[in-house]
Amino acid sequence: MPAIDLSAVQYDPLNPVIAGAPVSERRLSDLQGYFADTAAFEQALAMDDPVLYRVYSLEPGTGEGDLAYGFGVLMPGKVGQEYYFTKGHYHAWRAAAEVYIGLSGSGYMLLEDEQTGASRLLPLTGHSAVYVPGGTAHRTINTGTTPLTYIGINPARAGHDYGSIAERGFRQIVVEVAGTPTLIDRALYAASGRPA
Ligand code: MN
């Protein structure tokens, strides 16, 4: 692989593939247990195991004051009525905040405050930026018809904590109701199966 110049990275906002950068790729099968409609998940997986998202990570330094950033590409689609999303995480260092800058596409960031449990759904599009405070679980959600692409920038020492989200999921989820992305309670959705 060619060495990357971490001081000056070129990218395509519609498809920010960063050659030579470490990439993490997540397929549908990697998100077993994450989507609320488990029957729809099994049905989809029986048909195909598409890539849902890729993140290209850049770490210019690992010192106390350094920043790390990543380019995300999240595909459009749904499992049942629930839009494709990234797994979501807290930062291992809970105080660490993050800035997301939308590059293209149309979607949201779902934030969940660890202390209060309160959810916030904030637009993430080609012309928006979202601030994720410390102590907040966060995921991106693609509610559009093209890939949702974005940059996330956080302290290099932030780290990732996927465990609690993997265990119990976000309290609220984004599903299509009558053609409109709608934030609803996960437990209600799971109890009712597919909403009308
Ligand atoms: Mn993060």
Image (tube, grey):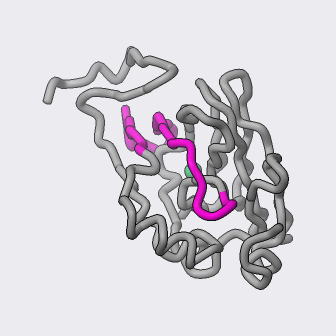
Q: Vertical placement of 156 versus 192: above or below?
A: above
Q: Residue furthest bottom?
A: 191
**Horizontal side, residue 84 vs residue 121: left or right:** left
Residue sitting nearer the eye, 126 or 63 = 126
Say which residue appears at 79% left-offset and 49% top-offset. Answer: 181
Say which residue appears at 73% left-offset and 53% top-offset. Answer: 110
Could you tell me residue 46's position as x and y percent?
Answer: 39, 69
Say which residue appears at 16% left-offset and 24% top-offset. Answer: 2
Q: If the image is split into quadrants, where does the C terminus sit? A: bottom right
Residue sitting nearer the eye, 166 or 2 = 166
Q: Is residue 79 magenta?
A: yes
Q: If the image is split into quadrants, where does the N terminus sit? A: top left
Could you tell me residue 20's position as x and y percent?
Answer: 23, 31
The answer to whether residue 177 is seen in the rendering is yes
Residue sitting nearer the eye, 45 or 86 = 45
Q: Vertical placement of 123 versus 48: above or below?
A: above
Say which residue appears at 66% left-offset and 37% top-offset. Answer: 144
**Horizontal side, residue 119 vs residue 85: left or right:** right
Exactly how many numbered labels are in the figure? Answer: 0
Determine the image quadrant of residue 4: top left
Residue sitting nearer the eye, 10 or 144 = 144
Determine the image quadrant of residue 174: bottom right
Q: Vertical placement of 150 versus 2: above or below?
A: below
Q: Residue furthest left?
A: 1
Residue range corresponding to the magenta coloring = 54-82
Determine the image quadrant of residue 8: top left
Could you tell me residue 58's position as x and y percent?
Answer: 38, 35
Could you tell me residue 48's position as x and y percent?
Answer: 37, 59
The answer to whether residue 121 is seen in the rendering is no
